[in-house]
Amino acid sequence: MRIEPEASTANIVLLGSFNPPIFRPEWFQAMGIIGDADAQSAKIRIVHEAVTAFSLDWANIQVDQNRFSIDTNDPPLIRIQDAVLKAFKEFLIHTPVHQLGINRTVHFSVGSFDVRDKIGRLLAPHEPWGEWGPKISGDPENPQVRGGMRSLLMSQLDRGDGYRGSINAKVEPSGLRPIDGIFVEVNDHFFVGDDPARIIGSEPAMNILETQWSKSIARSEWIIDQVMALREKVK
Amino acid sequence: MNSTALVLSTRLDVNASHHGTLYQPNQHGWSENILSFKVADELHRAALTRPFLETAPSIVRPAAATMSLIPRHREISFLPPEAPPVDVGRRAFFIGLQEWEGVVTLVREDGFTARLIDLTHTNPDEEADFSTSEMSPDDFDLVVPGAIFRWSVGVLKMPGGAKRPTSQVVFRRLPQWTKRDLDRADALAEELVGTLEKIQTSDDNDTRSAR
């Protein structure tokens, strides 16, 4: 990526049928998915029969009955792939997983409010909004009342790699850098098999995760880089 | 008929659309709706097992807009447990600038030697020595010849904007190979042998015809 991010996250989401209470730090420790010190320093946020959520130094894990999610901010990002593969390929092989998402998010600075404003106008011009268009902008000198693009989601529905699913990219002003920051999230979504009802285990989803992780992360960073390139375009 | 109404309330906003989307977490941290539909559903069912009767004019039921704002039923005494959101704005971020995959070749008492593959650039493989002081104690047991790890070099960006160079060695906790993995590897090896044999046969034929 051509701009050094301010913050960066990778996230894996599985949709299927899960049993939240088992996903405790002690279970991950006992299975060798995380180390002893990791488990002991885990911050439990909630443990309930319907949802479990806890944080490690390097990851956040949240599980409810239909959804498993793990994210990390710190490299190596592949640690979350290893954790998911070890959990669901080695131990929870009979857990049905019918959808998989590999998500990559980045906050980066474009240097000034003006440049970010121009990028917003390039991605979502005001002119097509007709007579409302000129009113959207507000005061160009005052970021507090400067209107414009708040969120833009683009979807590629033909993945082009033989898998069913979509590649979705969202661009927003960054909450971390309110003046000059941009937030980009790329969601790489896979449907596992043709019929969720016929999925009886996690193996098909894990095969996708194992073979597609590196490609997915590289493609997401390439898409993020396309947005970063707009900084030069609007100058 | 007596105007007795069964009034049940869970005070939960059930957002069914939460499911079916893979956006998680949002850019400000964990989803605000950490108590998803299933939790709301669970609590709702719990509430149903302990119903309570209150007297309330039945006429208010079909006309929600004109209902009295004065509570006419007992509030459910337990509120759903809430997980505090992860505040991403106040923490330091480790931004990786370069990453290597390493394979341990030699283990020493105070560290190890490894062959490094550059994952960021196309540099040739290198060999480097690492000290155990660079590792997490959790990883000590994983250091054996052949073990795979990642070495990330980057900057730690502090919430105030300061930057500190940093690096991290993390040993990978990979899943055990399954029978299917081994079968797949065998099939791939056989395919490679077949390809090599074809090349060999074709070379032999070419040599014969040249004579």
Image (cartoon, coloured by chain):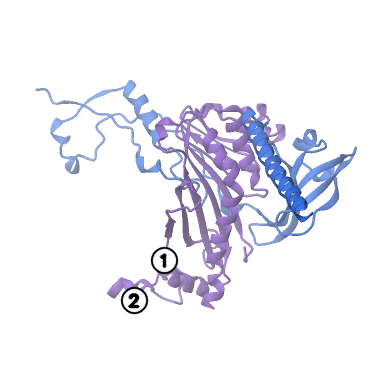
Chain colours: A purple, B blue
Screen quadrant of the C terminus of chain B? bottom right
Instruction: Give residue B66's position: percent from left, percent from top.
Output: 17, 42
**Point 24% across, 40% down: residue:** B69
Q: Residues within 10 Å of mark 2 (few under 14, many from 20)?
A: few
Establish whether labels 1 and 2 are both on one chain.
yes
The reply, left or right, for residue A34 in relation to residue A159 is right
Which chain does tag 2 point to? A
Residue tagged by mark 2?
Answer: A134
Instruction: Please state which amino acid type lies under the numbered disc 2.
Output: Pro
Look at 42% across and 62% down and name the residue there: A150
Provide the residue designation for mark 1. Answer: A149
User: Is residue A157 among the parts visible in the rendering?
Assistant: yes
Q: Residues within 10 Å of mark 1 (few under 14, many from 20)?
A: some
Q: Residue furthest top?
A: B49
Residue at disc 2, secondary structure: helix
Identify which amino acid the numbered label 1 is placed on.
Met
Q: In the figure, B118 relative to A139: above or below?
A: above
Task: Please give left or right for residue A6 compared with residue B69 in the image.
Answer: right
Q: Residue at x 51, y 42 (%)?
A: A13
Q: Is residue B15 visible?
A: no
Secondary structure under badge 1?
loop
What is the spatial separation of the Cα atoms under label 1 and label 2, in whole angstroms?
Answer: 13 Å
